[in-house]
Image (cartoon, helix red, strand yellow):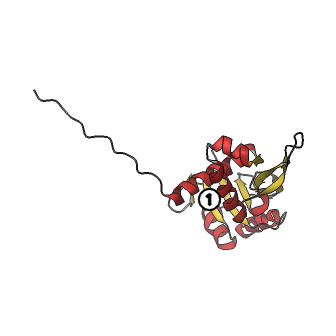
Amino acid sequence: MGAVTSAPAPVPSPASPSTARAINDRLALRLLQESGPLTATQLKSKTGLSRPSVADLVDRLTGAGLIEVVGESGAQRRGPNAKLYGIVANRAHLAALDVRTDRVTAVVTDLLGHHLAEAALPVGAPEDAVAALLRTAHEAGAAPLHTVVIGAPGLVTPATGELRDTSGLPAWHRDLVTALQRTLPAVVVVENET
């Protein structure tokens, strides 16, 4: 009986430099969101990247307006203080739209989840009133409304985001995503409320 040989496992190809930079940038932004603000040394420690890679990353993210110097660290020791970097929270705003059988509530936050505004309407309000509700809630700041996420009862058609079987809600709720996409300069996403 002959020996059975298996094909060697494929060796993953290394990421291109641009892909590696994108991965590192996302990692740093996530760390700054969860644990920030952080110094470059702390970013180096938490990411495992080299000092030059972190310096490039900080320059790239600062140049893109995604992070900024928010303070200094190291006042207890001799020598220059280290810069603390944090996410530019007001670069864009996010909105959550909670559709219930009795009301529609909009909440607007910055990129770090800080609550900026909230407004509500009875569920029977017309669809243009819901867009106006979001605009009113968004006027809490000058940053553009980047994304609106809607939580609503009923089934969501994955391809279109259309709401189906929305018992207890006015018929216009079926076209809520389309209506908001027409009136708001933002990404609009709908999910079942559960």
Q: Position of residue 37 (x, y in %)?
A: 78, 48
Q: Is residue 24 above or below residue 7?
A: below
Q: Is 189 or 143 nearer to us in this picture?
A: 143
> Do we see residue 2 in this rendering?
yes
In this rendering, position of residue 124 left or right of residue 72: left
Q: Amino acid at mark 1?
A: Val
The residue most toward the left is 1
Q: Is residue 181 above or below residue 116?
A: below
The residue most toward the front is 79
* Quarter of the figure with residue 92: bottom right
Q: Is residue 46 above or below residue 91?
A: above
Say which residue appears at 69% left-offset and 56% top-offset.
58
In this rendering, position of residue 11 left or right of residue 171: left
Q: Is 61 or 123 nearer to us in this picture?
A: 61
Say which residue appears at 34% left-offset and 45% top-offset.
10
Which residue was labeled with disc 1? 189
Q: Position of residue 48 (x, y in %)?
A: 61, 42
